Amino acid sequence: MHVLAGVGAALLLASCSDRPNDLRDNRYYKDPEPPPSSAPPAPPVQQETPRPAAAPTTQRKAAQLDRVAMTAQDLAEEGVQPSGSPSRAVQVALPDCQAPLGKATSAYQTAWEYPTGSTVRQYLAEYDGNAEEIVTAARAKLNCGKYQSGGAEVRVSTPAVTDGQVSWCATSSRQSSCTVLEADGSVLSVVVVTATTEAKAKPAVTRIAPLAATALARNS
């Protein structure tokens, strides 16, 4: 199943040019022999060898998620505009039925807005293991039927599985959001379209889901 659902440092070495000039204070010449002393010589100072810098894992993964996110070109036919700045915050669960999203190692989220005020949000997350497990766990939790949010009852439809994607809609008296989950290897993609009614949100997410799948395939 393909997954729906979301950044190097260099170790600087000191060069020989930074050493003090040994000729400047006559340290090049041998000093006179010191008088005998009964005190034992001081042990040499042990200097710790610098450790190599850790590999920039987080930055690398975040950059990969950037590449598989939908772009303005991908969404050109939708007539949307970017809304706000991309976020790298990791989400642990979806609002619908608190479906779990596991422990992602990195994430990337973008948002877009239609002239009507409806919105599109894509959340990408990368995991140490196969993201299909995240989709399976989320689907199993999406059986609550309904839940409360902001004092309003939200009704959750039965998830549908089509072409490796899990989709459903959550509707209240205020708005409706339709979501599609998909996985590709270790990457999860979550696409959510929010509109005033399910009749508007569902067709939009149905159009956008293939675009997200095409973008996600760039991870392969």
Image (cartoon, rainbow, N blue to C red):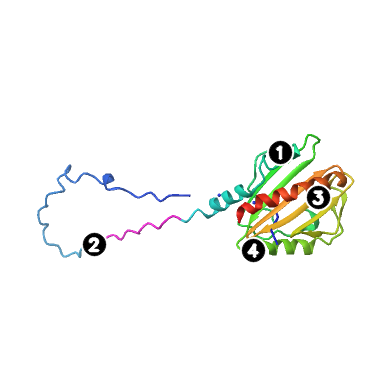
**Three-letter code, disc 4:** Asn
Labelled disc at residue 178: 3
Q: Which residue is situated farthest in the top direction here? A: 115
Nearest to viewer (mark 3 / mark 2): 3
In the rendering, at what x and y percent does residue 61 appear?
A: 57, 53
Q: Is residue 118 or residue 153 the one in the foreground?
A: 118
For label 1, the residue is: 76
Q: Earlier in the sequence, mark 4 or mark 1?
A: 1
Nearest to viewer (mark 1 / mark 3): 1
Q: Is residue 208 or residue 54 the one in the foreground?
A: 208
The kind of secondary structure element at disc 4 is: loop
**Three-letter code, disc 2:** Ala
Labelled disc at residue 42: 2
Q: How many other residues sit within 10 Å of disc 1, few (<14), some (14-19) or many (≥20)?
A: few
User: What range is drawn magenta here?
Assistant: 43-53
- Determine whether label 4 and label 1 are within 8 Å by CB: no
The kind of secondary structure element at disc 1 is: helix
The kind of secondary structure element at disc 3 is: strand
For label 4, the residue is: 130
Quadrant of the rendered structure where residue 104 is? bottom right
From mark 3 to mark 2, how far is it between C-alphas? 74 Å
Q: Residue at x 80, y 37 (%)?
A: 117
Image quarter of the N terminus: bottom right
Q: Residue at x 68, y 43 (%)?
A: 74
